[in-house]
Image: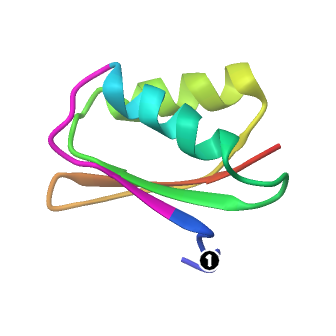
Amino acid sequence: MSETANIELNCEGLNCPLPILKTKKAIDSLNSGEILKMTATDPGSVNDMASWAKRTGHELVSHTEASNVHTFMIRKK
């Protein structure tokens, strides 16, 4: 990934809605333009993060998946 995260959030092992709630709290601590790297194992987080980013205006820079771990890079609006 070309983007560098300002902070990282591990939500592995958590199920909806906890990854979204923890992501919101982490994003709130960032300045505009900074990036959060969030990892999750809940397959539902893929759709949840895309919907949440669209709804809140934050940019879902990338999503990758390896060994059942989803990695999201989210830029604060």
In the image, residue 43 above or below residue 59: above
Q: Is residue 15 left or right of residue 57?
A: left
Decide: is 19 above or below 70: above
Point out residue 5 in the picture as x, y percentages from the top left corner: 59, 70
Q: Residue at x 57, y 22 (%)?
A: 51
Q: Residue furthest front?
A: 29
Q: In terms of image quadrants, where is residue 71?
A: bottom left
Left or right side of 35 for 34: right
Please state the horizontal and vertical placement of residue 4, each as a whole percent of the image: 62, 77
- Quadrant of the snapshot with the N terminus: bottom right
- Amino acid residing under circle 1: Thr
**Label 1: element kind:** loop
Q: Colour scheme used in the picture? A: rainbow
Residue on which the image places disc 1? 4
Residue in the picture at 75% in, 47% down: 76
The answer to if 14 sits in the magenta stretch is yes
Going 83% across and 43% down the picture, which residue do you hit?
77
Q: Is residue 73 magenta?
A: no
Residue ID at (44%, 35%):
22
Within-10-Å neighbours for mark 1: few <14, some 14–19, many 20+: few
Q: Is residue 64 left or right of residue 14?
A: right
Q: Position of residue 21 (x, y in %)?
A: 45, 26
Residue 44 position (above or below residue 29):
above
Q: How many marks?
A: 1
- Of the pair 67 and 73, the residue shown nearer to us: 73
Q: Is residue 16 above or below residue 11?
A: above
Of residue 40 and residue 31, the one placed in the foreground of this image is 31
Q: In the rendering, at what x and y percent does residue 19 appear?
A: 37, 33
Q: Find the magenta span and give its range.
A: 8-16
